[in-house]
Amino acid sequence: MTDMEKEWLWLCSLPGFYRTQFSQLLDCFVTPQAVRTLSGKELNDLPFLTQQQKETFRNYQQNFSAEKAAEKLAVKQIRFYSCEHEQYPLPLREISDYPYGIFTRGSFPPPAGRSIAVVGARMCTNYGRSMAGQLAKQLALAGVSVVSGMAYGVDGIAQSACLDAGGRSFAVLGSGVDLCYPKEHYALYEQIQRQGCLISEYPPGTQPLPSHFPLRNRIISGLCSVTVVVEAKRKSGSLITADLALEQGRDVYAFPGRIGDPLSAGCIDLIRQGAGIITDIDLFLEAAGYAPAEKRRKKRAKKISLSAEEELVYQCIGSRAVSLQEIACRLDLPIHRVMSSVSALQLKGVIRETVNQHYILADGFTDCQI
């Protein structure tokens, strides 16, 4: 562990401190080393820390040894990655409130661009269980990792199904990675450690306090380009994750469920607000750019004649759905001209619409030659 990593480890190990306090400290003192060495007067003058936090800080200044802490982590097979570490996931680093450090157990980091967050109700229905399991199995077969929170219900079901299908799964915990919560998921906890990774911004030994879980949701969505909500009530933790994903510029999809069912209300609200709707898992995988392996093998090169403007629009569209407005902004073209080119490309079979004027390359054109 480098000296800089040790400085970050010191900062991120402060008990009772959260991302907000870390951000305020770094705004004032810039580096973790400067924070660690601040004077008693500087500490006392900080208005955003409680008296308890100031006492904890002083104690850690005097007694915390980064070397000994690193040794303890190694014994527990826990690794620490600061936000400056080369293996810190780039998608997570891009969100505004990224964690300054992450503690992990298992194989880290998740494959870049090959992870989808699957979240949903803890007390899910049989329908929710079935959809979560089917989706996770198909994701595993397509080589896509499932990221979730290892909670009861949809989270745990999706992660178990992914692992049982030979895939990889990553669990973002509301406790230290050395603690299994809920305890009933210990077998899943162990399996995730073997076939994926346990992740937490909280240092080892941190208990699973209720306030930790909403905070960890931004990491679940931040690690992934797509978040899927299987079942959710209104004002649920799953909708918090979906809202965070949208704020982070990620795509959100939802299963529609049954009208009138409280566990479908949250998903229906998301779809009404513009989230993608999943009515067919294979079509969803194609829209998200994760077509099953056998479909990818069938793709072949094709030669199509395009106009200069159609070529420009074509270059903006890939295996991940992109909106009409995004294309217009990227090319700095009037929306009506982009619509004309998009229509031409659809007629030529090069692209197809997924939902609400979002477009991806048609099957067979991911590696095409124009």
Image (cartoon, rainbow, N blue to C red):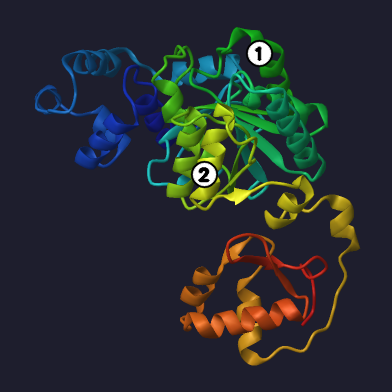
Q: Position of residue 9 (x, y in %)?
A: 42, 27
Residue plotted at (46% across, 29% down): 216
Residue 257 in view, yes or no: yes
Q: Quadrant of residue 150?
A: top right
Would residue 292 appear left or right of 328 to someone viewing this image? Answer: right
Residue plotted at (72% across, 28% down): 127
Residue carrying label 1:
185
**Crowding near the residue tagged with mark 2, few <14, some 14–19, many ≥20 C-alpha atoms within 10 Å:** many
Q: Nearer the viewer, mark 1 or mark 2?
A: 2
Looking at the rendered structure, the secondary structure element under dot 1 is: helix
Residue plotted at (42% across, 48% down): 247
**Crowding near the residue tagged with mark 1, few <14, some 14–19, many ≥20 C-alpha atoms within 10 Å:** some
Residue carrying label 2:
270
Real-space Cα separation, disc 1 to disc 2, in angstroms: 29 Å
Residue plotted at (60% across, 84% down): 340
Residue 154 in the image: above or below residue 167: above
Would residue 10 appear left or right of 332 to someone viewing this image? Answer: left
Q: Position of residue 337 (x, y in %)?
A: 54, 85
Residue 27 in the image: above or below residue 351: above
Q: Tell me which label, 1 or 2, sits earlier in the chain.
A: 1
Q: Quadrant of residue 64?
A: top left
